Structure formats: structure tokens, C-alpha cells
Image (cartoon, grey):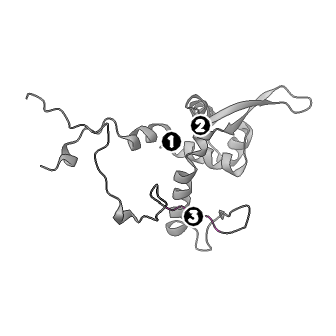
Amino acid sequence: MDPRLDRDTSNCSIARTLEIVGEKWTILILREVWYGSSRFSDFERVLGCPRNLLATRLRMLVEEGILATETYKEPGSRSRPKYVITPKGMDLVPAVMGLLQWGDRYRADPEGPAVLARHRECGAHVDVQIRCELGHPVEAKDIESVPGPAFRMRSSEGA
């Protein structure tokens, strides 16, 4: 029997990540943060997300350390929180950019993508690439999955 088919998946990093960011509104909030939004009212206006759901998602992103809050105050108004990306949140950029790249290729309008990702310094198109730790470009067909330090087999019940 192939051990990959009888492995314990309860500690899967992908599943654990999706528990945090695997919901539409969460990814769209992160998109808006990268596009420059930082206030609840900005997210609400752009996303059209129900207020209670938006508040829950923002709170979770702060609790998970993906976003942080800073206080801002407009003249004549009370102090309010704004949301800023943390280093942990910045580490999600390649994943979200990968979704954008796939969507631009397979789901964009006939006229093309709604937003283009460009390198601020030189203006060139930005794309997501997979590289090994030595810097070699790697295609999906060349990725080998091997047991890691937390690999476990499912326990045999009744054994």
C-alpha cells in the first residue's frame, strides 16, 4: 500500500492555512490591504461585505497576526483603528499573487485583467515563480513530495 494514501492529514499545513485564509472575504480583504485600503469603511465600500462578517474577518486577521491595528483620527472625529499588514501577512503575498496570476490567465474578462501587477521600480510585469532554495526555477512536474519531520501514518483502529 502506498503510504501517501494512508497518511495522517490532521497536521497538513495547507489545511491549517485554509482555516485562516481559505474564505473568500478574507482573501479579498488582504487584496484590498495590498491595494492600499486600511479603514473599515474602505473595505465595506469596496467589498460590499456584510458589516458583521467584515468585522469578524478583520478581527481574526488581527488575532492571527496577519494584520495589525493602528489608531488614526480625522479632524473633528473620534479615534478609529486602521489596518496595516504585518510581516506575517506579507508572507501571504506570493499565495495571493498566485491566485491573481491564475485568475488573469483563466478567469479574466475578455478585455483582459482588471489590475496589472508591476514592479514599482522598473515597471515590469510581476509574476509568481517557484524556485528551490538554491535559486533554480522549478516546474510543478519537477516537485517531489517526501515525508517531513511531522509525517505520520493514520493509526490503525482495532490493531
**Cα–Cα gap, marks 3 and 2:** 23 Å
Residue 132 image point, x, y percent: 44, 58
**Cα–Cα gap, marks 1 and 3:** 21 Å
- Left/right placement of residue 81 relative to residue 30 reads right
Q: Of the numbered discs in the image, which one, if any, rests on residue 127?
A: 3
Residue matched to label 1: 21
- Left/right placement of residue 76 relative to residue 31 reads right
The mark lying in front, picked from 1 and 3, is 3
Residue 82 image point, x, y percent: 74, 34
Please report the bounds of the magenta region as a residue range: 125-129
**Structural crowding at the residue carrying mark 1, measured as other residues with C-alpha within 10 Å and reported as few (<14), some (14–19) or many (≥20):** some
Q: Quadrant of residue 154?
A: top left
Secondary structure category for the residue under label 2? loop
| N-term mark: 3 or 2 | 2
- Left/right placement of residue 71 relative to residue 156 reads right
| N-term mark: 1 or 2 | 1
Dominant SS of magenta comes to: loop
